[in-house]
Image: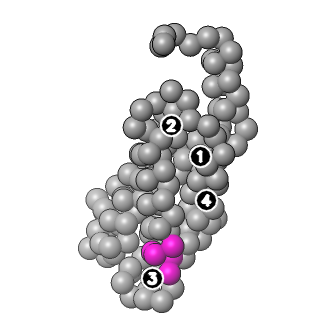
Amino acid sequence: MSNVRTSAETEQRSEKMSGLGRVLITVYIILAMAATFRSVYQIMTKFDEAPLAYILSAVSGVVYIVATIALIRRGRGIWRPIAWAALLFELVGVLVVGTLSITMPQLFGHPSVWSFYGQGYGFIPLVLPVLGLIWLSKEKQTL
């Protein structure tokens, strides 16, 4: 079996990157940059005010970076399982941190990206992994 892609395979791959896939990846890129830069600034300038919240924001930034790369490369080797793991981790993180920020707000000091289910980011952190998981589940894996 040849590793050379035919024009039909290339066209099929391009179609997969249209629509929802392009929007998801674009939003992930924006969220990755926003969460990462925000957390770096907060850790450098006021870490002592809310260390847990700022560490959680940094973790979310790293997860968004990994998810972005994995979604872009999802059809190659190990990247598809990494995409699944990153999106599931993100969803669990948003649900756990969101719930704790409501039930035990004293833990945080300041909001993190995932606090109140991503309210500070228009609830995008809550919706995005759900849409990503749906997209991955409906897409056929390519080799």
Residue at position x 51%, y 85% from top?
A: 102
Residue at position x 46%, y 30% from top?
A: 76
Badge 1 crowding class, 10 Å Cα cut-off, few under 14, some 14 to 19, many 20 or more, is some
Residue wearing tag 3: 100
Tell whether position 111 is magenta: no
> Which mark is first along the chain, 3 or 2?
2
Residue type, mark 1 in image: Leu
Q: Please give left or right for residue 90 compared with residue 13 in the image.
A: left
Residue 65's spot in the image, x, y percent?
Answer: 43, 46
Residue type, mark 4 in image: Val
- Disc 3 is placed on an element classified as helix
Residue wearing tag 1: 136
Q: Main secondary structure of the magenta part?
A: helix
Residue type, mark 2 in image: Arg
Which numbered tag is attached to residue 74? 2
Badge 4 crowding class, 10 Å Cα cut-off, few under 14, some 14 to 19, many 20 or more, is some
Colouring scheme applied when the structure was drawn: one colour
Asked if labels 4 and 3 touch by Cβ distance under 8 angstroms, the answer is no
CA distance for labels 1 and 4 = 10 Å
CA distance for labels 2 and 1 = 9 Å
Q: Please give left or right for residue 73 compared with residue 124 in the image.
A: left
Dot in front, 3 or 1: 1
Asked if labels 1 and 2 touch by Cβ distance under 8 angstroms, the answer is yes
Residue 119 at least partly seen: yes
- Disc 1 is placed on an element classified as helix
